[in-house]
Image: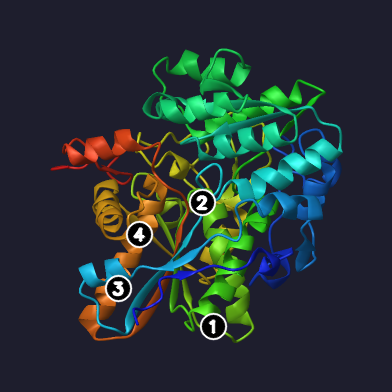
Amino acid sequence: MPDRTKFVLDEKDMPTSWYNIIPDLPGELAPPLHPATDEPLGPEALAPLFAMELIKQEMSPERFIEIPEEVQAVYKTYRPSPLNRALQLERDLGLPPGVKIFYKYEGVSPAGSHKPNTAIPQAFYNKQEGIKRIATETGAGQWGSAMSIACALYDMECAVYMVGISYDQKPYRRILMESYGAEVISSPSTRTNAGKHVLEMDPNSLGSLGIAISEAVEDAATRDDTHYCLGSVLNHVCLHQTIIGEEAILQMEMADAEPDVVVACVGGGSNFAGISFPYYKRRADGKSSARLLAVEPKACPTLTAGEYRYDLGDEAGLTPKMMMYTLGHDFVPAGIHAGGLRYHGDSPLVSLLAKEGAIEAVAVHQNACFDAAVQFARAEGILPAPESSHAIRAAIDEALAAREAGEDRTILFGLSGHGHFDLAAYEAYNTGKLEDYDFAAGSMCEGA
């Protein structure tokens, strides 16, 4: 009988609460500060931008937070997501029986990524408070797509400020968002003071997530009917994503396997948090010894080259200051195709875990990632998003290292989304035009 390759939970077994890591952190989480006064921020300061229930979740000391039944009902249209064993990839890599690769596939969602896991509850809570419109940003378009879908489900308007380089590179993401009823604006734009300022300084700006966040926050702050939603970084966003890891634990038990390493790409941190935080708790409970490995691009290596300090979450200084690993809020990364990983900072939760040595981080070049993505696609039949390819690269490297060392190793990685809207990136790779950028060098790598 062939080895089993897919492990799917019944929807009745889907987790009914999110895991909040805050009570289990290895150190004290520094509070967000007012961008002008540097005073700690209370809930009232965030109320003009966020739904109150999300603010409560942001600061909650509760270890588990119940998922509303209405949100569970929407989740069940695409969750639980499958967990697969990559048997064909294992064969291609020539791995011995003791080296196994599993992946949790989030590309089955309506947006093709993990992002609806938080877009749906964010839209739900805002709708409950009578908000009629959401302003947000997006890098590669995955978060914008998810928020557009969520707003359509709850009959809300949606304005998406899309990073300019991705707006140009990924027109089909824009078309998808517009098809769901969203207004998509290339950022930096002339419709906000933040965007105008950037364009005055650099009329050819590629844009960045920090700039797009400034525009979306300014938009929301100037309208009474509008709130702001963020697709990563914040505590409540990481919270909502933990359903990924909670499902994965149950599915790995179905596979009679326990990971030695859990791998995921990291930009703002929500995808990594989603699969790794429940394993962090499992490790704290003495049920696992898994290493938790975050993988980021060499062009924007926040955890591996950034400073751990307070910094703004956006370019214009409209958002709170957060204690995190950062490259500087005015840093504009090179125009790599993994647009969702082009963020100058990381989640304060992920950053604290990195500072305390509770997680590991590595940075990789995009050509090496696309090497791994194409190898994975030809073996497993799924074309991964450029962001997800970072996790695949590291998972393959872990497997090869185990093979060479003669060690058994079970690897679980998060496949955060498919790459069906990223074909321009694959065309660049296939034709030898994909460039590598190195943050340390500040320019394209020699020989790339």
First in sequence: mark 3 or mark 4? 4
Q: How much space separates mark 3 and mark 1, taking CA atoms?
A: 19 Å
Q: Label 2's element?
A: loop
Which residue carries the number 2 mark?
108
Q: Is residue 55 above or below residue 168?
A: below
How far apart are the two marked residues, 2 and 3, measured between alpha carbons?
A: 25 Å
Q: Mark 4: which amino acid?
A: Ile
Identify residue type, mark 2: Val
Give percent across and percent down for residue 396: 30, 66
Q: Which mark is residue 394?
A: none
Callout 3: helix, strand or loop?
helix
Pointer 1: what residue?
288
Which mark sits nearer the N-terminus, 4 or 2? Answer: 2
Of mark 1 and mark 4, the one earlier in the sequence is 1
What amino acid does circle 1 point to?
A: Ser
Q: Position of residue 79 (x, y in %)?
A: 61, 57
Q: Give the label on residue 392, or none.
A: 4
Label 1 neighbour load within 10 Å: few <14, some 14-19, many 20+ = some
Q: Secondary structure at mark 1?
A: loop
